[in-house]
Amino acid sequence: MIATTPPPPYFAVIFTSVRTEVDENYTETSTEMVRLAEQHAGYLGHESAREEVGITVSYWKDLESIRAWKQQTDHLVAQKMGREKWYAAYKTRICAVERDYGVQI
């Protein structure tokens, strides 16, 4: 599903990853991170896809909301698990969205 976002400007966090073979609580943690992010101040929505490379784009009101989410306690634990077990490689990019357009179904 394509996230419904407000008119720009807002921010996007693009998280790109390659998984390891370890699945230890990955699905449950991923689901919980979405639930927690949805409740976090400044969260606007997200989109995610996974094949060989996973890409999750989350949208945020401002940079402060992104900083606060990065420091959220449960998210910190998930980040540690990702570095230690779940991801062979990953990259996070943060960008300003200055323009968006398209057709919503």
Image: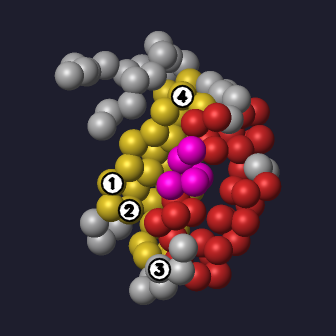
Q: Give the camera-side residue of 63 and 41.
A: 41
Q: Which disc, if any, is residue 54? A: 2
Of mark 4 and mark 3, the one earlier in the sequence is 3
Going by the image, does 2 lie left or right of 20?
left
Residue on which the image places disc 1? 49
Q: Give the camera-side residue of 38 and 66.
A: 38
Residue on which the image places disc 4? 44
| Other residues around mark 1 within 10 Å, as few (<14) / some (14–19) / many (≥20) | few
- Disc 4 to disc 3, how far (Cα)? 28 Å
Q: Secondary structure at mark 1?
A: strand
| Other residues around mark 4 within 10 Å, as few (<14) / some (14–19) / many (≥20) | many
Q: In the picture, which quadrant includes the C terminus?
A: top left
Residue contact at pointers 4 and 1, CB within 8 angstroms: no
Residue contact at pointers 2 and 1, CB within 8 angstroms: yes
Going by the image, does 6 lie left or right of 73?
left
Residue 19 position in % (x across, y down): 43, 76
- Disc 4 to disc 1, how far (Cα)? 18 Å
Check the image and name the residue furthest to the bottom.
Answer: 21
Q: In the rendered structure, which segment of residues is drawn in magenta? A: 31-35
Of mark 3 and mark 2, the one earlier in the sequence is 3
Q: Give the camera-side residue of 17 and 99.
A: 17
Residue contact at pointers 2 and 4, CB within 8 angstroms: no
Residue at (63% x, 44% y) in the render: 36
Residue at (72% x, 66% y) in the render: 77
Q: Which amino acid is tagged 3?
A: Asp
Residue on which the image places disc 3? 23
Of badges 4 and 3, nearer the viewer stands 3
Q: Which amino acid is tagged 1?
A: Ala
Of badges 3 and 2, nearer the viewer stands 3
Residue 87 position in % (x across, y down): 51, 76
